Image (cartoon, helix red, strand yellow):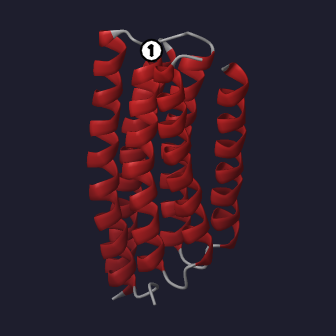
């Protein structure tokens, strides 16, 4: 059972790497931000699997914090973006 | 391996499939908006399936409720942030 969960976690880590590739290569800021959004959600999924594999339900609290922080990160990104647009005009 | 565990593993693999599809979609699509499209699919559905699989594996009700709460937050977060990112990309003209 835990080997299967381990395999799932490794593949999730690979999707994290895929998200990092988008962060590096993303032409616009919006690309980098959506990659960060995907990294946040992938981490939440990873924490869920870890809470089963290691039988530690405490990890779900960490996943909850990650879910909320990912949303706040996007809002901060959009908020700072708005100010710069005003200066540009 | 009880049938319940086999079902849970199948659901987890399905959720994983959505994550991989979302990541591949995010890497290969041409512009920001189609990448956003791929991303929000992976977020919502992939995580829902993984949360369901996890809930099946841990037969504890409080854990299941916490998993549902996490999924609900992520659905809210990714829906609004997808919209915010798209509007930001549209406004600053980097999208297409």
Q: How crowded is mark 1: few (under 14 residues within 10 Å), some or many (20 or more)?
A: some
Q: In this view, does A85 lie above or below A72?
A: below
Pinpoint residue A18: horizontal percent, then vertical percent. Answer: 68, 59
- In terms of depth relative to the viewer, which is nearer, B22 or A31? B22
Q: Quadrant of residue A80?
A: bottom left
Residue in view at x 50 percent, y 47 percent: B14
Query: In which quadrant of the rendered image does the C terminus of chain A lie?
Result: bottom left
Q: Mark 1 lies on which chain?
A: B
Residue B17 to residue A12: above or below: below
The reply to whether residue A4 is in sight is: yes
Q: Which of A5 and A13 is in front in this view?
A: A5
SS under mark 1: loop
Which of the image's four quarters has the N terminus of chain A? top right
Q: Which residue carries the number 1 mark?
A: B58
The answer to whether residue A83 is visible is: no
Q: As displayed, is residue B26 above or below residue B48?
A: below
Residue A73 place in picture, x, y as percent: 43, 49
Please give the count of numbered marks on the rendered protein: 1
Residue A56: x %, y % from top left:
54, 10
Residue shown at 56% from the left, 65% from the top: A32
């Amino acid at each position: 059972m835990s080997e299967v969960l381990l395999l799932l976690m490794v593949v999730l880590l690979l999707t994290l790497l895929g998200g990092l590739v988008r962060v590096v290569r993303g032409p616009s800021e919006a690309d980098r931000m959506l990659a960060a959004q995907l990294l946040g959600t992938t981490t939440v999924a990873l924490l869920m699997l870890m809470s089963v594999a290691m039988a530690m339900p405490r990890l779900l609290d960490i996943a909850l914090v990650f879910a909320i922080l990912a949303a706040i990160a996007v809002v901060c990104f959009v908020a700072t973006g708005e100010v710069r647009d005003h200066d540009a005009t | 391996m009880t049938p319940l565990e086999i079902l849970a593993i199948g659901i987890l693999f399905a959720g994983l499939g959505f994550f991989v599809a979302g990541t591949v979609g995010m890497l290969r699509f041409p512009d920001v908006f189609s990448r956003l499209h791929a991303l929000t699919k992976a977020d919502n559905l992939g995580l829902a399936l993984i949360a369901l699989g996890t809930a099946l594996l841990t037969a504890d009700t409080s854990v299941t409720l916490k998993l549902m709460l996490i999924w609900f937050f992520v659905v809210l977060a990714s829906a609004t942030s997808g919209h915010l990112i798209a509007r930001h990309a549209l406004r600053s003209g980097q999208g297409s």
